[in-house]
């Protein structure tokens, strides 16, 4: 059993029809929308067999004048 698959083979198993185009899959890979992150081996994109599509992962914008309590929550998730 292999530990990695090609991006296209993985997508056929991960998504129902219609499967996203190859260019869309590459965009997902480059933007961190697949976990664990795919990697390029030679000319081919490879993905772990247990990888999952997670979608957009947005991070909050932290400003220098934010409330210290907000900064504490954003850094470690606790308010106290």
Image: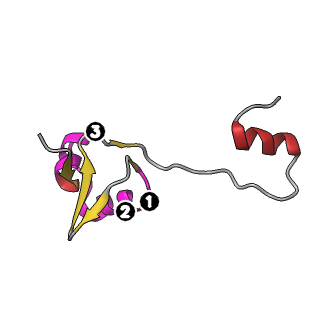
Residue 47 relative to residue 68: left or right = left
Q: Describe the colour scheme in one phrase.
A: secondary structure
Q: Which residue is mark 3?
A: 50
Per the rendering, the mark at residue 31 is 1
Instruction: Looking at the image, tell me whether mark 3 or mark 2 is earlier in sequence order.
Output: 2
Q: CA distance from mark 1 to mark 3?
A: 19 Å
The boundaries of the magenta stretch are 9-33
Q: Can you tell which of label 3 and label 2 is closer to the viewer?
A: 3
In the depicted structure, whether residue 66 falls above or below residue 52 = below
Per the rendering, the mark at residue 7 is none
Relative depth, front residue between 66 and 40: 40
- Secondary structure beneath dot 1 equals loop
In the depicted structure, whether residue 76 falls above or below residue 48 = above
Q: Quadrant of residue 78?
A: top right
Q: Residues within 10 Å of mark 1 (few under 14, many from 20)?
A: few
Relative depth, front residue between 55 and 4: 4
């Amino acid at each position: 059993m292999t530990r990695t698959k090609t991006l296209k083979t993985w997508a056929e198993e991960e998504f129902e029809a219609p499967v996203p185009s190859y260019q869309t899959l590459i965009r997902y890979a480059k933007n961190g929308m697949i976990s664990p992150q795919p990697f390029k081996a030679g000319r081919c994109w490879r993905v772990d067999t247990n990888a999952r599509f997670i979608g957009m992962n947005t991070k909050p914008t932290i400003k220098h004048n934010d409330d210290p309590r907000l900064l504490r929550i954003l850094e470690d998730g606790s308010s106290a």
